[in-house]
Image (cartoon, helix red, strand yellow):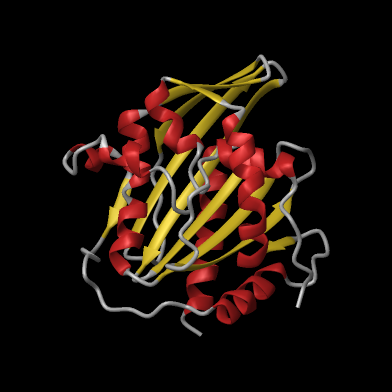
Amino acid sequence: MKKRTLLPLTLAAAFALAGCSGGGGDEAAKSSSPAEQTASSSSTTTDLKGAAGSQLTALQLAEIADELAGDDKNVIIIDEETIAAQLPLIKKQNKALKTEPERCAPFVENGQDLDLDAINTINVAIPGATATEAIGIQIVSYLDVSKASAEMDKSPALLKTCPEFSITEQGTKAEIKSSGIAAKTNAPRTEAVKMTTTAPTGEFSSVQLSAQKENNLIVVSLVGVKDAKSDVAKAEELTNKVLGLLNK
């Protein structure tokens, strides 16, 4: 099994800007009604509310992560124990951030209040050629399928409630714009968002694709994307690969 390690802060910040999913941010999601949440670009073939399914174990998730990592020594796998150890640092980081408008803060803070008793989760991080390029694959397996469905609703809420917001840390301000983007996977439900971040150091884009199959949520984030269409296709390919491993 590949070594588990802490997610580098530069990569964590990039994934935060990409809106990486995982459990926080209920307040902002609630500010948008169910009717409003249908405004995003999504592919839904069935209503998963109340669907029967089983939660994956930590061992099963670790095996999937190792399959995704293969022999690439640059890949970083972050397991649940490591995530739990990192949460205090994430909370400390978030306290130093100023988000405007304030209603968008829960999206930036997403993940800091993970209920690790109700989920099993693992992350696979693939660093890119530069500090602002990376691919992240997160798998969250919920005890309660309705929690997975609620998490999926946050992407439409982000588009409706916070299509534009800014983050300031130590006097440095970054402007973020988000928009829905078409995507389709083998999962019953798929959502995709493109985000463009403008900061003093330059501009970079990211794509986040979320897919739900029963109790399992898959989030693929590509940071520092060059071409949205090809990067969405890459995210779809990776998501379908994970879905195939779920079925093993």
- Residue sitting at x 75%, y 66%: 4
Q: Which quarter of the image is occupied by the N terminus?
A: bottom right
Query: Hey, which quadrant is residue 35 in on the image?
Result: top left
> In the displayed structure, would residue 27 be above or below residue 184?
above
Farthest residue to the right: give it.
Answer: 73
> In the displayed structure, would residue 184 be above or below residue 98?
below
- Residue sitting at x 31%, y 54%: 150
From where the camera sits, is residue 70 visible?
Answer: yes
Q: Provide residue 157's location: percent of width, then percent of height.
A: 32, 38
- Residue sitting at x 37%, y 80%: 54
From where the camera sits, is residue 224 visible?
Answer: no
In this picture, residue 208 sits left or right of residue 216:
right
Farthest residue to the left: give it.
Answer: 35
- Residue sitting at x 46%, y 81%: 247
Q: Provide residue 235's location: percent of width, then percent of height.
A: 54, 54
In this picture, residue 183 sits left or right of residue 125:
left
Farthest residue to the bottom: give it.
Answer: 248
Number of numbered tags placed on the structure image: 0
Q: Provide residue 74's location: percent of width, then percent of height.
A: 81, 59
> In the displayed structure, would residue 47 be above or below residue 22?
below
Query: Hey, which quadrant is residue 33 in on the image?
Result: top left
Q: Provide residue 199's location: percent of width, then percent of height.
A: 64, 19
Towards the viewer: 247 or 186: 247
